[in-house]
Amino acid sequence: MRFLALLAAALLSLPAAAQSYPARPVRIIVPFAPGGGSDFIARFAAQRLSTAFGSQVIVENRPGAGGTLGAEVGARAAPDGYTFTVIAGSDAVDPSLYKLAFDPVNDITPVIQFSQGPLLVVVHPSLPIKNMKDLIALAKSRPGGLSYATSGQGSIVHLSTELFLFMAGIKAVHIPYRGTGPAITDTMSGQTQFLFGSIAAVMPVVKQGRLRGIAVTTTQRLPALPDVPTIAESGVKGYDVVLWHGLVGPKGLPRAIVERVNGELNKALTAKDMAEKLAADGVSAAGGTPEQFGAIIKRDIETWRKVVQMAGVKAE
């Protein structure tokens, strides 16, 4: 009887314990400097969770080592629900290029995928290229004669382009830059012929007519560019690259906390203002379960590992 009484008391105390969380400020680590996509997502999550919790949620920017420094801090944090980390699709590339001090699959607890969206393939307007079929045909007529710009060696846009070249059976010269801005500038000047860029980065110059958008990398067209086809429907069947952001915690994060944070953020992602803000960056809200997000992380790590090996890509 005494055992049953103790068991009943323990069970009754669980809801109270769950309701007491959080008892102090929660932090969300951003492994990059303020101002980028990861920072925007983190501040949105912090604002919505602060309101839901009735307690402060702060954003802590920890840039360095291509984002791996902040990611390691998050992975090494105590699994008590007071430290989360925003990660991006580019983080799935890191295990294939760098020797990480943590396991990006087994040392984290997936919580929720925030967003999803494509890269936009753009070309210089002077080129006789209206679509991806034209680009492929021109590349085949000039083996190694076309060049493409990227934001850097081993970046996700570099690997996305290499995957396209491999699947299309063509070759082009890679010209890496230190950042997206210089890559766009040289493509606009005609120094390079095409690039794969984030919607937020290339959409302004496409609207100005300084570059031409010819395809998106996802299997679904972008609502903001309904006339721009996907790479898959342009002759490269099976091609699908999705950019994403999501939230993770350290390994061993209690399920009750995972479910609460996931539930609050799933509700927040359905808000109209959030959809409008994401659409401005060319992405859409994702949401879903922790398991779905975990599967995406594992899938992308394996995908980029194969591309790195196939293309012989090395870190800078």
Image: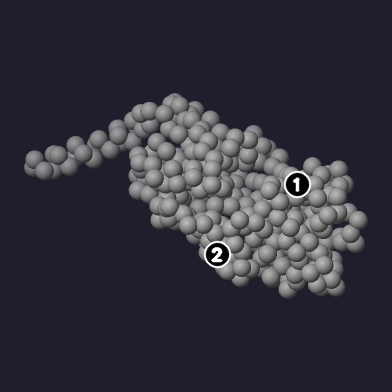
Which of the 4 image quadrants contains residue 38?
top right
Point out residue 251 in the picture as x, y percentages from the top left corner.
38, 49
Give the residue at x 62% y 52%. 243
Dot 1: few (<14), some (14–19), or many (≥20) neighbours within 10 Å? some
Point out residue 237 in the picture as x, y percentages from the top left corner.
70, 69
The mark nearer the N terminus, 2 or 1, is: 1
Can residue 45 be seen? no
- Mark 1, residue position: 182
Give the residue at x 8% y 42%. 1
Can residue 24 be seen? yes
Does 258 appear above or below 139? Answer: above
Q: Amino acid at mark 1?
A: Pro
Give the residue at x 49% y 28%. 51
- Mark 2, residue position: 305
* Foreground pick, 212 / 222: 212
Q: Amino acid at mark 2?
A: Arg
Disc 2 on helix, strand or loop?
helix
Which of the 4 image quadrants contains residue 5?
top left
Circle number at residue 125? none
* Foreground pick, 24 / 184: 184
Residue 290 horizontal side relative to residue 306, left or right: left
Give the residue at x 38% y 28%. 24
Point out residue 70 in the picture as x, y percentages from the top left corner.
49, 43
